[in-house]
Image (tube, rainbow, N blue to C red):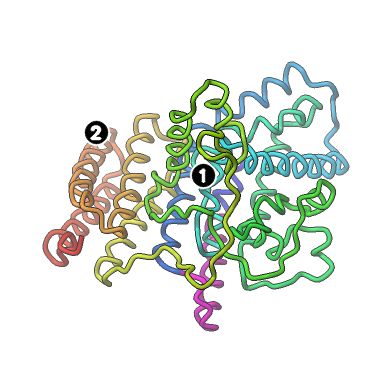
Amino acid sequence: MKTNYIALSVPIFFILIGIELAYTFYKKLNYYRLNDSIANLSQGIGSQLVGLFMKSVLFVGYMYIFEHWRLFEIPNTIWTWIILFIGVDFFYYWFHRMSHQINALWAAHIVHHQSEEYNLTVALRQSWFQGWFSWIFYLPLALIGFDPIMFLTLSSFNTLYQFWIHTRTIKSMGFLEYILNTPSHHRVHHGSNPKYIDKNHAGTLIIWDKLFGTFQQEEEEVYYGITKPLASWNPVWANLHYWKDLIETAKQSDNVTDKIRVFVKPPGWFPEKLGGFQSAPEIDAVNYRKFHTETAFKVMIYAVLLFLIALALGSYQLFYFDRLTLFTNTLIASFTILSMLTCGALLEKKRWFVAAEHFRYLLGLFILYFLYRLDFPLEWLLGLLVVHFAIAVYFYFIKPIYRNV
């Protein structure tokens, strides 16, 4: 039986986020903003949901090569685990590096770099579609003959390791800076300063960057985010906006060759007709401003409620996905994503928020009725119904939030 180590680690993630939040609040460091943190965590929920639907399809390639084409029968020993750990980390480096150097791959990976803050919630800000291609980079391990379950285990722990390095509270790790990927090294990776862009692609071991010439020490202050800020809390738009830019650039290109190059060249590449390659601009420290939206307290309360609904449903699906039908999972996931979408719209004061929220309530009632027909536990249904109507009452009668939108 495969163990979902990421799902099991979710409570630990939130405990550590709480500790970092309390520490930064006590020290008055201002490393967290509620709207940014909600946006980051929403991306994490969406990434896990999409991954649940795609996990079997994406893993079939590794399984097929291992079962039919593997070159060696590798015994399960401690040395096998050590060698595979190094192999997973090596191929992660190249997957990560290519995700920064090929536009079509960057279109997915860009999501992880959009936040203009740097805290533990950023670690959970993951692309919804990156998993659709990342597995291809690890196929040599299947060809060699490394067991799929061993591979899944070590790739999960490679991902888990990278959670804690998304922090500004740890400045230096001493001699470990020479071997491991540390918070200092990874802060550089998230920088939009020109000297920091496309540096420090390591997963666990920083030695790959030093070997292949992509290492950069943390020096001047890091400005986080992407060179063209997303300026949105919308989780769906965050995953699609760069694709829109690429498609528009391809449409403006004169020939088929340039249209293809738009997707395979590095970020910043444009046909000569459109001005050629555009380097990342220097940071204007004087006029630098982070994207921010002011939100009334009662509106923020409702936004938090919407996020908590998405978090609760997303967590439920992480653990019970295999016990539910495809249609049930699709309904619940749709409601979860819609909750995150309306939360983002509320924080941005979008006019379409009210219509989307009405639709979300109707969808919620339909899902409850559908679960009732499936003989879902009655106590669960009654609890969900009470919560659904209580929040609706808050929306329509107690705190008319829509007047602030």
In the image shown, does 264 or 152 lie closer to the viewer?
Answer: 264
Q: Is residue 369 left or right of residue 198?
A: left
Name, please, the residue furthest toward the right.
79
Q: Are marks 2 and 1 in contact (CB under 8 Å)?
A: no
Which of the pair 265/380 is nearer the observer?
A: 265
Cα–Cα span, label 2 and label 1: 35 Å
Which sits in the foreground, 35 or 105? 105
Query: What's the residue type where badge 1 is placed?
Result: Ser
Q: State the residue at coordinates (85%, 30%).
A: 74
Which disc is residue 385 wearing? none
Tell me the tag on residue 127. 1
Q: Secondary structure at mark 2?
A: helix
Q: Which residues are magenta?
A: 9-32
Find disc 2 in the rendering and name its residue. 373
Residue 19 within the magenta-colored segment of the rendering: yes
Label 2: how many Cα within 10 Å (few below 14, some 14–19, many 20+): few
Is residue 139 visible in the rendered structure shown here?
yes
